[in-house]
Amino acid sequence: METHEVVTRTSTVRMEAGRMIRITALPNVVQTLDDAKGDVQIFDQLSQGQPFTALLDIRQLKSQEREAREFYSQPGHTPGLVAIAILIGSPMSRVIGNFFMGFNKSEIPARLFTSEDEALTWLAAFPVAAAQPQPR
């Protein structure tokens, strides 16, 4: 499978094998609402309306504005997302990850990890081919 990658102001977003989108926060950036909305548009482009899982690596993220956190916590903001694993490491990434988990009211499984291998193993348990994309 060909890898498609987009670099934004705050992250690298890449579709990988197994229909997994890997989002890696760039070092020391502050994500705004506009950044969050732009990332979701990229998810839509890369997934082409098909189901996918996501690995979100926020270990190097400096901060995330309140509006961006609220946007991500809204149900239905990412159609087709089957499950999301969030990689944390720094104290700030732990705060952001815990905030997301506390406000994640959707039916999409989400979990925090400090180990990338464990996150990938967990995501592999979600069969994206059998899932149906969520309507916008």
Image: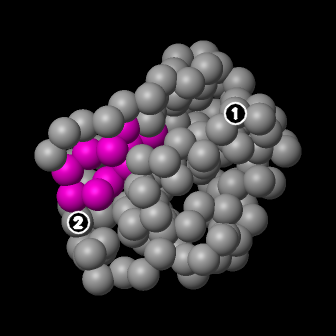
Q: Position of residue 107 (x, y in %)?
A: 57, 81
Please name the residue that numbered disc 2 is placed on.
124
Q: Position of residue 86 (x, y in %)?
A: 47, 51
Please name the residue that numbered disc 1 is placed on.
35
Q: Where 66 falls versus 20 (above or below)?
A: above
Q: Position of residue 134 (x, y in %)?
A: 55, 77
Marks 1 and 2 sit apart, C-alpha to C-alpha, by 28 Å
Closer to us: 88 or 53: 53
Q: Where 5 falls versus 103 (above or below)?
A: above
Q: Main secondary structure of the magenta part?
A: strand
Q: Where 68 falls versus 92 (above or below)?
A: below
Whether the magenta-drawn stretch holds residue 16 is answered as yes
Q: What is the residue that sits farthest to the left in this orientation? A: 1
Which label number is shown at residue 132? none
Closer to us: 60 or 23: 23
Q: Where 13 falls versus 15 (above or below)?
A: above
Amino acid type of the residue tagged 1 in the rendering: Asp
Whether the magenta-drawn stretch holds residue 22 is answered as yes
Amino acid type of the residue tagged 2 in the rendering: Ala
Closer to us: 50 or 12: 50
The stretch in magenta equals 14-23
Q: Quadrant of residue 14?
A: top left
Q: What is the residue that sits farthest to the top in this orientation? A: 28
Density class for disc 1 (Cα within 10 Å; few <14, some 14-19, many ≥20) is some
The reply to whether residue 102 is in sight is no
Left or right, 87 with respect to 97, comes to left
Left or right, 48 with respect to 108, comes to left
Q: Earlier in the sequence, mark 1 or mark 2?
A: 1
